[in-house]
Image: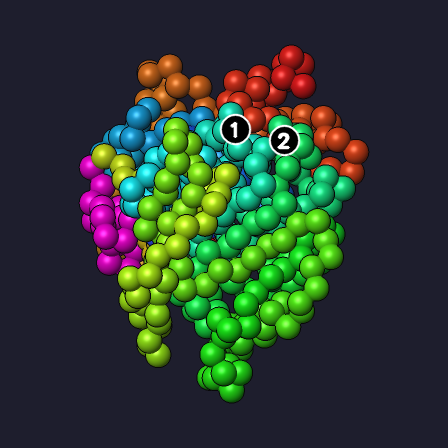
């Protein structure tokens, strides 16, 4: 019997577990360990609440969890409750699928002023993540500035721009819905440090902006290269650029809110008395290879709030080699050291869609199978972990407990919503134990 521990129950973790069951069949036991009492990581608290069809992939992960040889073990923090060295002594292979939940920092003067918020915190807030549920974003001003030209920037812009009615059918956290309903924002600016040809936004997400009830898009036609140059772009990017060109072609602004795309603007400082009041940017130029250079010309953008959507980093774990430059575990094709592997964003950095994690998971399991092919071990796996947790007074949450939490969240959903998430670990644990107080 092979014993495999997967740390992290997001898409990378679940696809790895699925691959383990396909590859090893009855000959492996898999424990998926998560510090939260609830599974699915990014699916639950990263994917936007109005993208329910993407979240539906968790049904596939349910099927994995319900298999005989896979356990979900929530409420156990690796690095705190149990060390990596201990896991390595208990399991034949340990796979880190911990994602990249920390924000890449902006690193400009003033980036710590109140009102400058990282996307991990903001997305976690509207998605009801216990780490961010108490965030209090200042939505009482006119103008929010969003930094970054990726899909997270678009998610954030869309959530800020939607009317309460447009959240029907979503599982946005109640606290966020209430605050967004009172928002006084009339203007959102999305800042890109390079140009329209360098965006990392996908067409589907741009099209969603177009359908917003109360917001018009505003793009300056002078930011684009000649249209003939679009032909050389990869098809998805060409479509996205085409959508931006459509936005630029419209000059009427009829709706009460504007979403402005401001390109070639590199953040250099945040200023304000005790809170953010303005962003200082330097104009940039981009050469034909996409490299950017500052022009030395600066201007100020008045801002009541800045949300920085410029990428993420994997938090280090004590005892695990770390690649500081890329913000992920130091690894060679997913191998960190004998018996220790990483997968998903913890392996390759924060890029790609949910589906990208599937081949990643299968690939790492192929490597594990090849590494384990020679040699027999007598690791205790699940029983050893249970004994250790018991000894330390750590009470895990199993998949059946999660099913109780899930049912309670569905029970307390507002009309038309799939669920109302619990936003504290205490409430999750109470629901796991069937306590009514949590409802
Ligand atoms: P991303 O796609 O890597 O975009 C990050 C953006 O931040 C880039 O435009 C980058 O510009 C910019 N940036 C980085 N450092 C900066 C700085 N110091 N100052 C100003 N701008 C800076 O990352 P993401 O938006 O966080 O998304 C992460 C992954 O999740 C992506 O693969 C994305 O497609 C995926 N995702 C998908 C969906 C969806 O499918 N609906 C939703 C959300 C996220 P440069 O290009 O100049 O570096």
Q: Secondary structure at mark 2?
A: helix
Badge count? 2
Residue 93, x across and y down, in percent: 31, 45
Q: Is residue 152 above or below residue 138?
A: below
Q: Nearer the viewer, residue 34 or 354?
A: 354
Q: Quadrant of ligand 1?
A: bottom left
Kindly identify the residue that appears in the image at 35 percent across and 79 percent down.
Answer: 288
**Residue 257, percent from left and from top:** 66, 50
Taking the image as shown, residue 364 lies to the left or right of residue 209, namely left
Q: Are marks 1 and 2 in contact (CB under 8 Å)?
A: yes
In percent of the image, x 76 and y 42: which residue is there?
165
**Is there any visible trace of residue 75 in the rendered image?**
yes
* Classed neighbour count for the residue bearing mark 1: other residues with Cα under 10 Å, few (<14), some (14–19), many (≥20): some
Query: Quadrant location of residue 198?
Result: bottom left
Q: Find residue 30 and report its horizontal and vertical position in percent.
A: 42, 41
The part of the chain drawn in magenta is 319-342
* Left or right placement of residue 437 versus residue 149 in this view: right
Q: Say whether residue 368 is visible.
A: no
Q: Which residue is mark 1?
A: 136
343 lies left or right of 156: left
Label 2 CA crowd tier, 10 Å (few <14, some 14–19, many 20+)? some
Residue 275 image position (x, y, % from top left): 42, 32
User: Can you tell which mark lies on residue 412?
Assistant: none
Q: Secondary structure at mark 1?
A: loop
- Seen in the picture, residue 147 relative to 117 is either above or below; the reply is below
Verify whether residue 92 appears in magenta. Answer: no
């Amino acid at each position: 019997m092979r014993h495999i521990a997967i740390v992290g129950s997001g898409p990378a973790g679940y696809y790895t577990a699925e691959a383990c069951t396909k590859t090893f069949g009855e000959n492996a036991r898999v424990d998926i360990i998560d510090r939260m009492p609830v599974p699915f990581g990014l699916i639950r608290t990263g994917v936007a609440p109005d993208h329910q069809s993407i979240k539906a992939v968790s049904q596939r992960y349910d099927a994995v969890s319900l298999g005989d040889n896979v356990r979900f073990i929530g409420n156990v923090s690796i690095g705190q409750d149990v060390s990596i060295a201990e896991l390595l002594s208990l399991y034949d292979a340990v796979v880190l699928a911990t994602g990249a939940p920390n924000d890449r920092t902006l690193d400009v003067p003033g980036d710590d002023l109140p009102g400058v918020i990282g996307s991990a915190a903001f997305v976690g807030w509207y998605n009801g993540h216990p780490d961010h549920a108490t965030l209090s974003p200042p939505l009482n001003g006119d103008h929010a500035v969003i930094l970054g030209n990726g899909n997270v920037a678009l998610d954030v812009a869309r959530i800020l721009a939607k009317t309460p009615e447009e959240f029907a059918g979503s599982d946005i956290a109640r606290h966020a819905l209430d605050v967004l309903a009172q928002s006084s924002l009339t203007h959102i600016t999305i800042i890109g440090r390079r140009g329209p040809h360098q965006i990392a936004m996908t067409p589907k997400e741009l099209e969603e902006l177009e359908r917003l009830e109360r917001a018009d898009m505003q793009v300056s036609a002078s930011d684009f290269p000649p249209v003939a140059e679009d032909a050389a772009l990869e098809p998805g990017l060409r479509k996205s650029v085409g959508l931006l060109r459509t936005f630029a072609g419209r000059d009427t602004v009829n709706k009460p809110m504007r979403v402005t795309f401001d390109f070639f603007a590199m953040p250099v400082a945040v200023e304000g008395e005790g809170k953010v009041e303005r962003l200082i940017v330097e104009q940039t130029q981009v050469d034909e290879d996409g490299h950017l250079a500052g022009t030395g010309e600066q201007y100020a953008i008045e801002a009541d709030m800045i949300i920085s959507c410029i990428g993420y980093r994997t938090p280090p774990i004590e005892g695990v080699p770390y690649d500081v430059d890329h913000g992920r575990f130091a690894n060679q094709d997913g191998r960190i050291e004998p018996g220790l592997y990483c997968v998903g964003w913890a392996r390759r950095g924060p890029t790609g869609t949910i589906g990208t994690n599937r081949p990643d998971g299968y690939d790492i399991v192929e490597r594990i199978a090849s590494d384990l092919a020679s040699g027999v071990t007598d690791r205790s796996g699940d029983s050893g972990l249970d004994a250790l947790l018991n000894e330390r007074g750590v009470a895990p949450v199993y998949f059946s407990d999660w099913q109780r939490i899930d049912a309670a969240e569905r029970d307390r959903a507002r009309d038309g919503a799939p669920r109302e998430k619990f936003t504290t670990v205490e409430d999750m644990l109470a629901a796991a134990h069937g306590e009514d107080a949590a409802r």
